[in-house]
Image (cartoon, grey):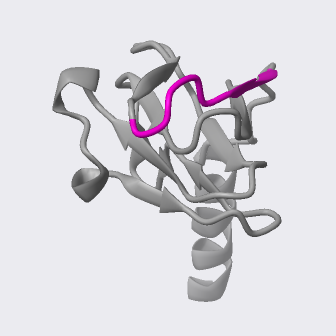
Amino acid sequence: MKRGWIVALFGMLLIASPAPALAQQVDSTQSSSTVSVTNTFQQVLPQNDTRRGCTVQNKGSNNMFVFFGPIASATTNNSFLLLPAAGNSVSCNLPGGTIRSQVSITGTGGDRYVFSEQ
């Protein structure tokens, strides 16, 4: 009798439990650009309070630096270094959320980078 009661209770808990959340599908906008002026930060993406993700990848032959935050505060010392290695990128996705601030980049004039935003 006791076993039947436990099985019934467990079954009710399974029915009452919410379904696991499924990953949401989001559209992505992808583009590329070049560093305009050597060692001068330029905007890649503006602040976006609804951003769900972003990625910046170095496609040039020199180091690049990516900064998250107001461009007036951007320096290479407080930026993420992107080496010119294949597949080297930085993302604004964190385990607990997404960086929604302005994204800026600097490097060597003429070097290309690609970026996407969701």
Which residue occupies the foreground of this view, 39 or 23? 39
Question: What's the residue at 39%, 29% (across, down)?
Answer: 41
Question: What's the residue at 19%, 22% (across, down)?
Answer: 72
Write the start and end of the magenta stretch as one range: 28-39
Which residue occupies the foreground of this view, 28 or 16? 28
Give the image location of residue 17, x and y in percent. Answer: 60, 48
Give the image location of residue 84, x and y in percent. Answer: 70, 63
Q: Is residue 29 magenta?
A: yes
Residue 94 is left or right of residue 89, and the answer is left
Q: Is residue 79 magenta?
A: no
Give the image location of residue 44, x and y in percent. Answer: 54, 23
Q: Is residue 29 above or below residue 3?
A: above
Question: What's the residue at 24%, 44% (across, down)?
Answer: 75
Residue 20 makes an appearance in the image: no
Give the image location of residue 49, x and y in percent. Answer: 40, 13
Residue 28 is left or right of residue 78, and the answer is right
Which residue occupies the foreground of this view, 118 or 77? 77
Q: Residue furthest left?
A: 73
Total marks drawn? 0
